[in-house]
Amino acid sequence: MQPTPFTPWSWRDTAGYPGAYDPAGTDSIDEGTTGVDLVGFKVEATDGHIGSIDEASNEVGSSYLVVDTGPWIFGSKVLLPAGTVQTVDREEKKVYVDRTKDQIKESPKYDKDTFTSAEYRGQVGDYYTGSYRDYPH
């Protein structure tokens, strides 16, 4: 189940999702472990495909995915906090997030030069916390 309150930069507790992959647990996505590297995985919103993972971080308390949206949002990228990830299907190489395409499209614009700054991360975290509060999943 989704942690309460919503914590955007932490992987959710997947105990309530049978067969779910737990990136924060023993199957860490860090390349130096036995886990799975999520780069290249397809990303599915609640209403369809949005792109593929270009970069992933498993830093405690600041985990995220950078998703290349291809032609869907005119070839741009979006930053998705780890808290938006509902499940990961390793066999199908797909990550399922609990937001709609429109919610993701309306998120703060991704900037490769500032996406790690505290100010930008604050904007993105506030946006997704608000979208979770307004449209819980």
Image: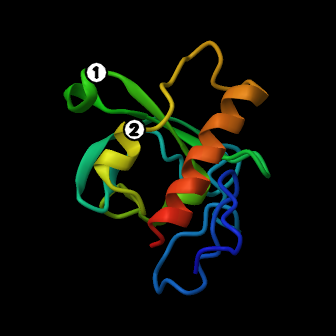
Given the image, on which type of amino acid does mark 1 rest? Gly
Residue at screen point 65% across, 45% down? 125
Q: Residue at x 41, y 27 (%)?
A: 77
Q: Nearer the viewer, residue 75 or 132?
A: 132
In the depicted structure, whether residue 127 falls above or below residue 85: above
Left or right side of 35 for 79: left
Residue 121, position as x, y percentages in the image: 68, 34
Q: How many marks?
A: 2
Residue at disc 1, secondary structure: loop
- Quarter placement of the N terminus: bottom right
Q: Position of residue 20 (x, y in %)?
A: 49, 75
Q: Residues within 10 Å of mark 1 (few under 14, many from 20)?
A: few
User: Residue 135 in the image: x percent, y percent?
Assistant: 44, 66
Instruction: Give yes or no for contact between labels 1 and 2 (Cβ–Cβ under 8 Å).
Output: no
Image mark for residue 106: 2
Please, what secondary structure does the residue beneath circle 2 have? loop
**Residue at the spot x=67%, y=58% of the render?**
28
Q: CA distance from mark 1 to mark 2?
A: 15 Å
